[in-house]
Image (cartoon, rainbow, N blue to C red):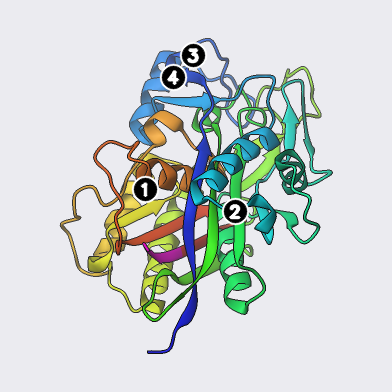
Amino acid sequence: MNKRIYSVITGAGNYIPTKQIKNEDFLTNEFYESNGEKITKSNHEITQKFHEITTIAERRYITDDLMTSDLAYFAAVEAIKSANIDKEELDYIIVANNFGDTKPDNRASDHVPSLASKVKHKLEIHNPNTIAYDLTFGCPGWLQGVIQADYYIKSGDAKKILVIGAEVLSRISDPHDRDCMLYADGAGAVVLEAKESDTPVGILAHKTRSDTFSHAGLLHMGKSFNPEFENKDDLFLKMNGRRLYQYALDTVPPSIKACLDKAEISITDVDKVLIHQANGKMDDAILKRLYGLYDIHEIPEGVMPMTIATLGNTSVATLPTLYDLIIKDKLDGHQIKKDDVLIFASVGAGMNINAVVYKVD
């Protein structure tokens, strides 16, 4: 069999912030409906219902001395070390994010220079041929960066690429919106390298879709739900949760199946489903529907590792952090071994969906 070039992950890293925020920490918040009316339910009832729906009990926030580019850098250092490569040999640094750098006292997004440029600067890489750029694609941004890296590698344009997902959602979430309890901060990164092989390995297939005609506004930026909020021009991340939930259930499972079909692999051959975690119950429902497409009603135990209960929704950082925790034996009950078949999948603002079928080298 003729050898082909494949994209394989050779190193990974993450940064999980040190500041733990539990659901009880929201008991003093004043919550409002989207129409500006104050919610009459007690915060104890609100947080209890939130936990039932999302499975989130706590999340991590960064400290005031850090910004998103710092988190991205910390994860990058770990990934480069893990891959045991010379950082000067990197062909690309791709940083998926949606809000750039934000400060604790200023929510304005700082995208100049790009986070990727800041990370390259912090890494002290001198090579001008290490191309650094940002990618904004909602929560699926990191996985889309991996897909772009695969194109570069298979075209012969690159041999080593660093793909980072970093986000600080705590600074753009409205403290008067119940959805603020979903969001968290973090960063994850991987190094992808070209590998010549006569058997399929690494990225076997990928699939992306964008549904903007009817769904572009499901996630958007808007003003605080509190009509008396002090800075009336501040914008926060807003979500149409019910419509987004239904959209995800309707579109994510068939998108994953389309990717598996492209790779000529059945769900029965998949060892782990690594999915973006925005809502624990939603992911359970997505998994059930995915297996249902194959007329399978008994889902294998442990096939979908979860971190959302303790880490919350970290957007683009979810998947690389999850992967790194598993391969370094830091997620109880889960392991990834050679020849395992993984599915990476994500859904988010856009609305965008993507999936990657990956065989562990």
Answer few, some or many: residues within 10 Å of disc 3's Cα (few below 14, many 20 plus, some between 14 and 19): few
Q: State the residue position of label 3.
A: 25
Residue 167 at x, y = what percent?
62, 38
Along the polypeptide, which appears first: circle 1 or circle 4?
Answer: 4
- Mark 2 vs 1: CB contact within 8 A: no
- Mark 4 vs 2: CB contact within 8 A: no
| Residue at 75%, 42% in the rendered image | 124
Where residue 283 is drawn, which disc sits there?
1
Q: Secondary structure at mark 1?
A: helix
Q: Secondary structure at mark 3?
A: helix
What amino acid does circle 2 point to? Val
Where residue 163 is drawn, which disc sits there?
2
Span colored in magenta: 356-361
Residue 10 falls left or right of residue 100: left
Q: Nearer the viewer, mark 2 or mark 1?
A: 2
- The quadrant of the picture occupied by the C terminus is bottom left
Query: Does residue 157 belong to the magenta stretch?
Result: no
Where residue 272 is drawn, which disc sits there?
none
- The quadrant of the picture occupied by the N terminus is bottom left
Could you say which quadrant of the image residue 50 lies in?
Answer: top left
The extreme bottom residue here reads 1
- Mark 3 vs 4: CB contact within 8 A: yes
Cα separation between marks 3 and 4: 5 Å
